[in-house]
Structures are given as structure tokens and as C-alpha cells.
Amino acid sequence: MNSTNRTLVTVAVVFALIVVGLVIYFLVNKWHRNQMAAGRQQAQKECLEVIQKMEADAEAMRAQLEAERQMRPGDEVFPTVFGTPAPDRNTDAKPADCEKVDVQVLSFFNYLDSRSNLSFNEVDGGSAGFFRECAALLMADPPVNIGEMQELFRLVKNVTHFYRVLGKKRLMLAKEILVSEERVLEPAIAVFYATIVECGKPLTGDAQPLSIDRLYDYAGYFLNTLGGRSYLLRRESKIRMLVNYYAILIVDRANDEKFNRYGIDVRPYIDYLFYDISNQKGLTYRERYLTQLTALRNKYM
């Protein structure tokens, strides 16, 4: 083969390689564009899914907030129930206004007496008489706080304490109140705690205030005994948290006033309740509880 033919062959081979290279390039480029388009479509699909999920989460959050709002008594309900403007929901733990609290207690009893679904007509003194009667029975027969596990009889007495002391009819009426007045239960407990503990006043119609020593017995019962804790575990979580919260406050007062005779250590209960309340929805004064528990945690560090 002469040089001219070799040159032609070389040119032909080079040309063929260029053509093949161009074909491969265009094929690869087309595949790459298709892959990029598919990637963009997948990314758009994933973005749409994320947006839809965020919208669904936002809608769920709005529904949850609305549910919480419905669970909380509105400002328009408070004057009807407590005879005063709505209690402040901020985190400041202000001293109780005892004159205002007196009005709130009387108004609350009048409100309960007006509720046709609650059978106070069979109770002497209406709702106030019912509360006085229950309080007197409970104060006269406190639960066991020491040696509960030493005898089966003591344990059984503690587990059945409220049924044994109050009886079936009173317990059923108390349950009616808890269920039908759930929306005002939280501020009502706050009002009664302020009346009995902070202001040291008797219940309406009583001459003497309730014994703080007896209240301490019940605080220890709920926090520190199998009977009390098992009783709370059978209750709705909101009630359980509120009872534990005020029990901790009473034991803290007992520490301050040097009558914590059972030596109850509130530190583990503070930590547990703080976590519990942090994850609980629908508490009107949730921020206040958490602020108070934080202060107690710092106090007992």
C-alpha cells in the first residue's frame, strides 16, 4: 500500500472515530439530559410531598391549637363561674388576693348549684355543703403514710381509701363534677388551693380552716404511697398532674415550716412532673406550672 492509500485509510479511520465519538457524545448527552429531567421531576415530586406534609402538619397544629383553645375555658366563661375576670395566665406566681378568692369560691358554688345535671338537691347546703361534708370525712380519717407495705390490711385500706371514707354516692357525685365541669376544673383547683393553703381560710360555712397537717398527709399519700399512686394512675392524666403539682407545693410548704415528718423528698417528683407537664396539652396554666417547678428544682438542687 502506497503512502496515498495509507493516508486515505488513516483519514477514513479518523473520520469514523470522530463520527462514532460524536454519536456516543450525542447519545450520552441525550441520556444525561433525560437523567437530569428525571432528577428534576423526582426533586419536584419530593418537594411537593414535603410541602404537602408541611401543610398537613400545619393544619394538624392548627387543629390541635383549636382543640386546646376549646379545652380551656374562654374569658367569657370565667365571670359566670368565678364572678371575676379571667385569672391571669402568665407565668408570674403572684400572691393570692384573698378577698378576690372569697368571691371566686362563692361564685363557683353558686355556679355548681345552678347546674341542673348535678344532684346537689339531696345534699344539705348544696354544693358548698357537699364539699364541707367530704372534707370533714377526709380530714377525720387520713390515709396511711408509714408502714403501708407491712400489713396487707393497711395496703387494702389505702387502695380503697376514698371509697371507704366517702362512700359510693359521694364518689359518684364527685365524678359527675369532674366530668361535667372539666373545662373549669383547673382554675377551680387553683382557687381552692389559694383559699385553703395560701389564705388559710375555711370552706364556705365552716368555722375552722382545714388542717395543713392533714393536707400534708394527703400530699404524702398521693406522692409516696402505693395506694395513692395507684389511685392517681386510674385517673385522667390532667387530674393526675394537677394533684401531683399541688401535692408537691404542700410538701414544699411543709419543708419551709418544718413539719415534713415523713421526710418526703420532692426532687424526683419535681423532675418527673416537669417532663409530664411539658408534654401535656390543654393545660391553661402550663407555663406557670413549669416556671414554679423550675424554681423548686433550683431550690432543691
Image (cartoon, rainbow, N blue to C red):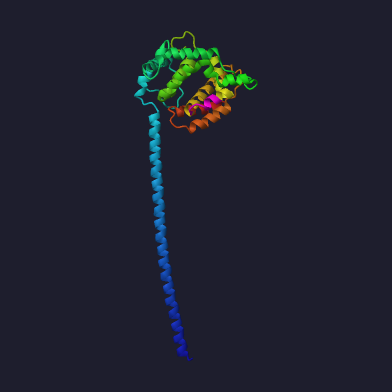
Given residues 7 and 83, the one toward you in this image is 83
Percent position of residue 109, x then y? 40, 15
Q: Residue furthest right?
A: 150
Residue at the location (41% across, 61% down)? 36
Residues in magenta, as a range? 230-236
Could you say which quadrant of the image residue 213 lies in?
top right
Relative to 105, is 34 above or below? below
Count of numbered marks: 0
Residue 35 seen in the figure: yes
Q: Is residue 234 magenta?
A: yes
Q: Residue furthest front?
A: 168
Residue at the location (42% across, 58% down)? 39
Residue 262 seen in the figure: no
Relative to 23, is 120 above or below? above
Percent position of residue 238, x then y? 47, 28
Percent position of residue 181, x then y? 41, 23
Q: Is residue 61 magenta?
A: no
Residue at the location (53% across, 13% down)? 139
Relative to 68, is 93 above or below? above
Percent position of residue 46, x then y? 41, 52
Q: Residue furthest bottom?
A: 2
What is the quadrant of the C terminus in the image?
A: top right
Relative to 298, is 48 above or below? below
Q: Residue furthest left?
A: 76
Residue at the location (45% across, 21% down)? 175
Residue 140 shown left or right of residue 13 in the figure: right
